[in-house]
Image: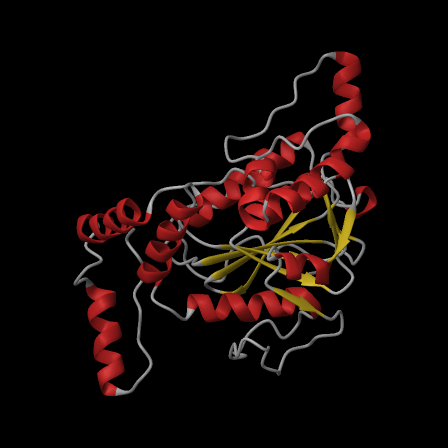
């Protein structure tokens, strides 16, 4: 895990970074990857009201910063990725009538993030409960440590998972499994969540890179100071950022349409139209990718203008 937050990314950025508190650490494993680390270990990285808005501003910044192509979210320490909402703050608001709020993009700026342009990988270490699980459900990819635990315990404390998890969960795992998860408050190990299709890969805590996963993902440079699930997430993010940024964003958009229930014909037509309207079809990166393939060399992508 990163020991501290880098005040500035290692490149000349177009937009100033949003203000963040000590609750959140920002580091840049490579110039194209932003690593966001929840930094409230004493509270199992539960997210406070102010931190929700802080995180939303970070993801908005990522989407608008041309040089950043992928984000990763994780939690400090090995005990918890995020154990959900700050219940002490919630209890205080119940007693005082003080209003709690979340950004439109939901818990951690992720759980209802439906218009994000760039992918976010959840590197889940330890407890991933309540709102933490809601973030993971709507992340673009989920990598989990072998000790990670997932669950929606809301029903056990008299509340409901309202940050987007319920309708999305049933689309991923099916009605009966979603009902089991939401109605019992049961906790599940990482391997079971992988079998359900909610986790892409389970990573051992001592993983330091250098091996190919069963999917054949190529291990590339970067992230040597990290280990475990964060290390693996950086490797996967490097693979993503090594691809055409235009193609990655358009592909993500197309999948999001299907996630939202848009039909195949309408979704495909929408993707085609966006490519034409935004100049991706026949654009600089498309031409470069085809040229590089013919010339048998690595493509030299330019930052996307999407």
Q: Image quadrant for the N terminus? A: bottom right
Is any atom of residue 19 visible in this view?
A: no
Q: Check the image and name the residue furthest to the top.
A: 97
Q: Residue 111 is drawn in which quadrant?
A: top right
> Going by the picture, which residue comes out furthest to the front?
176
- Residue 50 position within the rendered picture, expressed as x and y whole percent measured from the top left: 64, 31
Residue occupying the point 22% across, 58% down:
280
Q: Residue at x 57, y 67 (%)?
A: 234
Please name whichever residue, 172 or 141, is drawn nearer the observer in this view of the structure.
172
Q: Quadrant of residue 21?
A: top right
From the top left corner, tell me how far across and down residue 242 is, in percent.
Answer: 41, 71
Residue 278 screen position, x and y as percent = 21, 50
Place of residue 74 in the rendered image (x, y in percent of width and height, measured from the top left): 65, 54
Q: Considering only vertical position in the picture, is 7 above or below 239?
A: above
Q: Is residue 140 visible?
A: yes
Above or below, 8 relative to 214: above
Foreground residue among 265 and 305:
265
The answer to whether 204 appears left or right of 58 in the picture is right
Residue placed most toward the observer, 239 or 260: 260
């Amino acid at each position: 895990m990163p020991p501290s937050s880098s005040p500035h990314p290692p490149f000349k950025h177009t937009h100033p970074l949003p203000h963040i508190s000590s609750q959140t650490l920002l580091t840049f494993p490579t110039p194209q990857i932003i690593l966001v680390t929840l930094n409230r270990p004493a509270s199992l990285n539960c997210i406070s009201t102010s931190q929700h808005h802080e995180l939303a501003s970070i993801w908005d910044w990522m989407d608008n910063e041309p040089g950043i192509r992928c984000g990763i979210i994780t939690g400090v320490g090995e005990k918890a990725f995020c154990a959900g909402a700050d219940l002490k703050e919630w209890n205080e608001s119940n007693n005082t009538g003080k209003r709690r709020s979340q950004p439109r993009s939901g818990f951690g700026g992720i759980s209802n993030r439906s218009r994000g342009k760039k992918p976010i990988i959840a590197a889940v270490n330890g407890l991933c409960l309540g709102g933490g699980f809601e973030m993971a459900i709507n992340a673009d990819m989920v990598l989990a440590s072998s000790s990670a635990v997932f669950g929606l315990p809301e029903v056990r404390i008299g509340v409901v998972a309202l940050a987007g998890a319920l309708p999305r969960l049933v689309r991923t795992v099916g009605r009966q499994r979603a009902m089991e998860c939401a109605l019992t408050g049961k906790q599940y190990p990482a391997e079971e969540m992988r079998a359900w299709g909610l986790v892409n890969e389970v990573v051992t805590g001592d993983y330091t890179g250098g091996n190919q996963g069963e999917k054949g993902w190529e291990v590339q440079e970067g992230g040597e100071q990290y280990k475990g699930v964060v290390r693996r997430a950086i490797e996967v993010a490097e693979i993503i950022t090594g691809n055409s940024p235009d193609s990655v964003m358009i592909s993500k958009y197309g999948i999001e349409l299907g996630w939202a229930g848009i039909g195949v014909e309408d979704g495909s037509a929408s993707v085609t139209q966006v490519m034409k309207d935004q100049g991706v079809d026949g654009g600089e990166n498309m031409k470069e990718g085809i040229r590089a393939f013919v010339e048998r060399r690595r493509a030299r992508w330019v930052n996307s203008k999407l």
